[in-house]
Image (tube, rainbow, N blue to C red):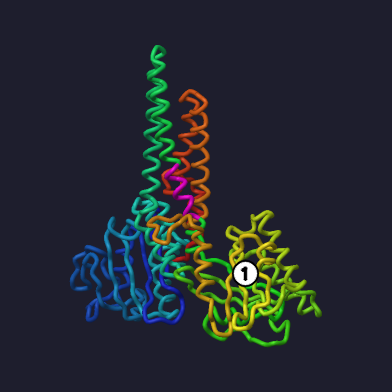
Amino acid sequence: MGETIAAVSTAYGEGGIGIVRISGARAGEILGCLFCRPGSPGRGARSPGIGETNAAKTFAFQNRRMHYGHIIDPSSGETIDEVLAVYMRAPHTYTGEDVAEIHCHGSVVSLRKILEKILASGAVPAEPGEFTKRAFLNGRIDLAQAGAVIDMIRAKTDRGYDAALGQLEGRLSAKISDVREILADACAEAAVNMDYPDEDDAAGDEAAARSVEARLTKAKAAMDALIATADAGRLIVEGIRAVIVGKPNVGKSSLLNALLRESRAIVSKTPGTTRDSIEEYLNIKGIPVRLTDTAGIRDAETDLEAMGIERSKDALRKADIILLTLDGSLPLSAADRKIIAELAGRLTGDRADSECGTVIAVINKRDLPEAIDRQALALLLPGVAMVGVSAITGEGTEEIEDRIVSAVYGGKARKGESVMVTNAAHKSLLLRAAASTEKALEMLRIGEALDFVETDMREAYDTLGEITGQTVTEGILDRVFSKFCVGK
């Protein structure tokens, strides 16, 4: 981390303000080379760096205070932009290093020119996520908090943002640290018993084993509680894929419009109007939902329609929530039953392609007399929720939203849960640690000696350390920070 890095930290494009960030030991020196206060006699010449006292040419930057001035090309004296600049001394900065920021006009040209001059003055381009990586390596945040940064940037709803903010504040890290402390105590107790065995005290050995077992049981329960939040947490942050499926002319496009509360899809009485998938995003009670209206599934009459139907089936395979739309004013048709049979197979078969896979039967055309046989439908799709709606009037759409929310939380993670696991990698590590802990418990229950149990306890302890970064490899760090944009 010896080099000073720089990057544009705001999105490229037109905007009122753009920010260029510099981090490293030479951040103040480089800022001093380029920044000139209005009316400075030395305008256009090299300005002294931080702490230099040549007041005739420039002034010393006050820590954490914005200064108004201009960025100047030090070789030509040309003014590049009118800016506000701030210098922040280590260690109380985002990266834990000296940091300088230049707030200029949000022009692509201005940002590019300023960054070019910074790099020409001795900085190197920052890699994706390198500012946050330095914050982690300098001990300002742990790895779980670093991952929460990207979740906050990508959050699509208040609920997702709040979940990420909780992790950034260290709530998940605190939970993980508590569990690791319990495991550490269990390992220490086992180690003491192994180092100072008393062959004449079988009762003491048994007491030590029971004490270790109690600690491991407590740790396992805490891990299980976090794991229970993982599926809901992932969907809250990343969003869910909801797909509207059904035969042609049952009101799928009307249902899309009703849920969006706008006329997004063309609605027609002619079967097969929707030839391609239509995707829209909506916020359902804090959960980001990618809603897809698909072409009606039937035996295709044209090659074009066949392509649309194949896309419908592909969307169906990837769906977290399936809104099976049926015409409630008509009995179940052969086409309906064919789609239902396919969904029933998904519910009982291999679910690796979908973590949620909940099917909600949407019985449309509630504004007409109902002719569908709900009992027959219940037999074909046991346990599937049925919601009567009128896509034309919007009646019943709120119940669909409630069902979607219920499917996401699944009765496992409460909506007000203060700590949620939102990262798939964290879930995987928790599952591994829980499995190692359970293995240790099983060995204790069958009377194995503590020295055999300790290996699994330490494995659980080290695995949890990968979440917060206490036991982590360079490869893991690269994977985490490769997801970041340049400048963060």
Q: Reply yes or no: does residue 410 show up in magenta.
A: no
Give me the residue at 35% from left, 80% from top: 81
The answer to whether residue 412 is left or right of residue 56 is: right
Seen in the picture, residue 481 relative to 260 is either above or below; the reply is above
Q: Quadrant of residue 190?
A: top left
- Image location of residue 109, percent across then percent down: 44, 80
The answer to whether residue 151 is left or right of residue 53 is: right
The answer to whether residue 241 is left or right of residue 155 is: right
Give me the residue at 52% from left, 55% from top: 424
Quadrant location of the C terminus in the rendered image = bottom left
Give me the residue at 52% from left, 72% from top: 399
Helix or strand or loop: what does disc 1 sit on? strand
Q: Main secondary structure of the magenta part?
A: helix
Picture mark count: 1
The answer to whether residue 57 is left or right of residue 31 is: left
Q: Reply yes or no: does residue 225 show up in magenta.
A: yes
Mark 1, Cα crowd under 10 Å, few <14 / some 14-19 / many 20+, is many
Q: Quadrant of residue 265?
A: bottom right
- Image location of residue 372, percent across then percent down: 68, 74
- Image location of residue 135, percent across then percent down: 37, 56
Give me the residue at 42% from left, 22% from top: 206
Residue for badge 1: 361
Seen in the picture, residue 415 relative to 307 is either above or below; the reply is above
Looking at the image, which is closer to me, 215 or 469? 215
Q: At label 1, which amino acid type do we have? A: Ala
Q: Quadrant of residue 55?
A: bottom left
Range of residues picked out in magenta? 221-230
- Image location of residue 87, percent across then percent down: 28, 66
Looking at the image, which is closer to me, 29 or 246? 246
